[in-house]
Amino acid sequence: MTETTETNILLVRHGQTAWNLGAGQVRYRGQTDIPLDKAGRAQASALARRLCSNKDSWLANKPIAGIYASPLQRAMQTAQPTAEGLGLPVIPHPGLMDMNLGRWQGMTHSEAARRYPEIHRQWREAPHTVTLPDGENLATVLKRSQDAVTELVIRHAGKTVMLIGHQVVNKVLLCWLLGLDNSHYWRMTQDNTCLNVFAHADGVFRVVTLNDTCHLR
């Protein structure tokens, strides 16, 4: 395997919103289309400065050739500063869409635990076994995001592609890329605008970095 045959995958989580770590209460977001807050926009700009500088070794000889984001505005807004800096469009991709959390969307964690105690307990203890009320399960999210990664690795073979997803999307993808099943979901951490880098060649994914937020320091 030579370096020129590798395809780099840059998997990013969107920036901060008012519903996660912002000024308001932390709420289940899912497919609710909420924008980045002020801190989230600053995080996206910091990420762009890093990626557009090409200082990371894995970008030095293989600049970003395509940028794809979940259609939700918090992901699209996270991608935009990098896209503008590189002169590339942000292409919405439904395969990166966040999990449909059904009736939980908009609820605080305590509200969901109070109204759906058994499902909430199961979600915390065995998330791979749960289908949320009027929502999805992790297997469904993995299938569409896995298909997206496979498609884009083929489309951008030998190049670097940037994908902006969500906490759930990224965590199930990381499990898959690391050869784990969804029962390991809670063992993954994805901070806002974190960067995960994988190199792909000959059907094998090689880990370069996980949950990297050096650009926020």
Image (tube, rainbow, N blue to C red):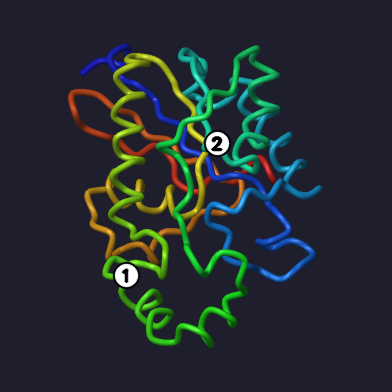
Question: Given the image, on which type of amino acid does mark 1 rest?
Answer: Val
Judge left or right: residue 173 versus residue 205.
right
Judge left or right: residue 217 versus residue 121.
right
The residue lying at 54 percent from left, 45 percent from top is 13
Q: Marks 1/2: CA distance?
A: 25 Å
Q: Which of the two residues, 15 or 30, is positioned nearer the viewer here?
A: 30
The residue lying at 40 percent from left, 53 percent from top is 171
Going by the picture, which residue comes out furthest to the front? 134
Q: Which residue is mark 1?
A: 130
Q: Secondary structure at mark 1?
A: loop
Image x and y of residue 54, in percent: 59, 20
Q: Quadrant of the N terminus?
A: top left
Question: Given the image, on which type of amino acid does mark 2 rest?
Answer: Pro
Above or below: residue 124 compared with residue 186: below
Q: Which residue is mark 2?
A: 71
Image x and y of residue 125, in percent: 34, 78
Image x and y of residue 204, in percent: 21, 32
Above or below: residue 163 compared with residue 193: above
Judge left or right: residue 39 versus residue 103.
right
- Crowd class of label 2 (few under 14; some 14 to 19; many from 20; radius 10 Å): many
Looking at marks 1 and 2 on the same chain, the residue that comes earlier in the sequence is marked by 2
Q: Check whether the beta carbons of the residues at disc 1 and disc 2 lie within 8 A of each other.
A: no
The residue lying at 57 percent from left, 76 percent from top is 109
Image x and y of residue 8, in percent: 39, 25
Q: Secondary structure at mark 2?
A: loop
Above or below: residue 120 compared with residue 103: below
The residue lying at 34 percent from left, 69 percent from top is 127
- Crowd class of label 1 (few under 14; some 14 to 19; many from 20; radius 10 Å): some
